[in-house]
Amino acid sequence: MTVATFTQPDYTSQSASAYKAALDGAAMVFARMGDAFAPHAQSSPDMTVRLDAGAIFVLSGAVPVLTEVAAQNTGTITAPTGSNKRIDLVVVDETTGAVSVITGTPTTGTPAAPALTAGKWPVAQIGTVSAPLTVSTTSITNSMLTDIRVGTPQGKRTPADDTVDKAQLVAGYANGWVFIQKQTASSSAQIDFALPSGYDRFELHIMNAAPATDAVAAWVRVSEDSGSTFVSGAGKYDWQSNNGGSSSLEGNTSDTKIVLTGTSLSVGNATGERMSGTLTLDGARDSVQTTLDFDGFVIGADGIGRLCRSSGMCYDTADTQSVRFLFASGNIASGTFVLFGLRTDQT
């Protein structure tokens, strides 16, 4: 579209030719914005509405892309039947610029414009309370249209953009910690997480995990077959724990699980009694012994909170594909569990 330099038209001080030129220039300056998606009747009015050309910015990923939209017509609008009256809404899609009509609710009483649908930009109202669409309406004229445009449609990210961005993040197009999954326990026997390949380290954040059974230990096991079974044989795990700031260590070099809370500490199930902390897994997808470190805080069956630190490993030199959190007996009454993965080798 041709541009012009804006000069304020002023017939009191400008010559006739200068005034006309200023009017033309002002119209050119305002045309692109003012005429964008402008609604009006057809040159030969019928039961459709004509929209002039417009433009929108659509985000492709993080990049805004200008999309020109040609002049377009609505679909044929059907008049209400009987003694019903109606008000319709002409809208433009914020991601495509395509026109559509939101049909109002027919009523024999006082009609109202329909609600604006999410993702749509308002253009025009067809009919008013005093002059609505009726059974006798055979064409849409300019006098029936109310221009309700506000600004211009800005464009939005499409669901496809979000899917691509999430896939890129999960696929590791950026270094650092990547959110993998969140689970909430509710009378759950255990909480299992798959460990995707391509990560250098995992962190399982355990928040306010409370047992259904009082005074129980917290355990961890790993799986080498995508969670079909979890390693639980004799002599498969080695662990050590230091709880409550004690200088002494407790542990087991030949166990069937890793005991996060050790033998001297347990988690209570009274109101407010729970455990929280971070479980770090290294070597999980590298076909070496998977090592685990836990740093947390436990409120025991006696209502006293204590520091809880433990470390351990699975002796198997296998590809660890899943991790399981559980209590020694009973269900996990409540708690939130969030898994993150660390990437350090992506460009």
Image (tube, helix red, strand yellow):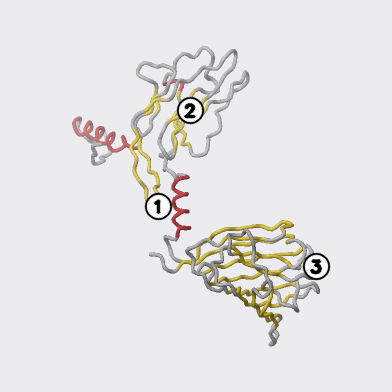
Mark linked to residue 101? 2
| Residue furthest bottom in the image | 247
Circle 1: residue type: Ala
Q: Quadrant of residue 250?
A: bottom right
In this rendering, does residue 9 appear at all? no
Image-based side of 296 in relation to 96, left or right: right
Q: Residue at x 52, y 19 (%)?
A: 133
What percent of the width, then of the height, locates residue 57?
A: 38, 43
Residue 110, given in percent of the width and then of the height, sits at 61, 22
In front of the other: 158 or 201 = 201
Q: Nearer the viewer, mark 2 or mark 1?
A: 1
How far separated are the C-alphas under marks 2 and 1?
Answer: 30 Å
Q: Earlier in the sequence, mark 1 or mark 3?
A: 1
Q: Toward which corner of the image does residue 36 lie, by quadrant?
A: top left
Residue lying farthest front? 234
Count residues near mark 3 (Cα–Cα under 10 Å), then give few for <14, some for 14-19, many for 20+: some
The answer to whether marks 2 and 1 mark residues whose Cβ atoms lie closer than 8 Å is no
Please state, as top left, top right, bottom left or bottom right, where the N terminus lies in the image: top left
Query: What separation in Å lies between label 1 and label 3 (alpha carbons)?
Result: 51 Å
- The residue wearing badge 3 is 214
* Residue 249 picture location, percent across and down: 68, 84
Q: State the residue position of label 1.
A: 62
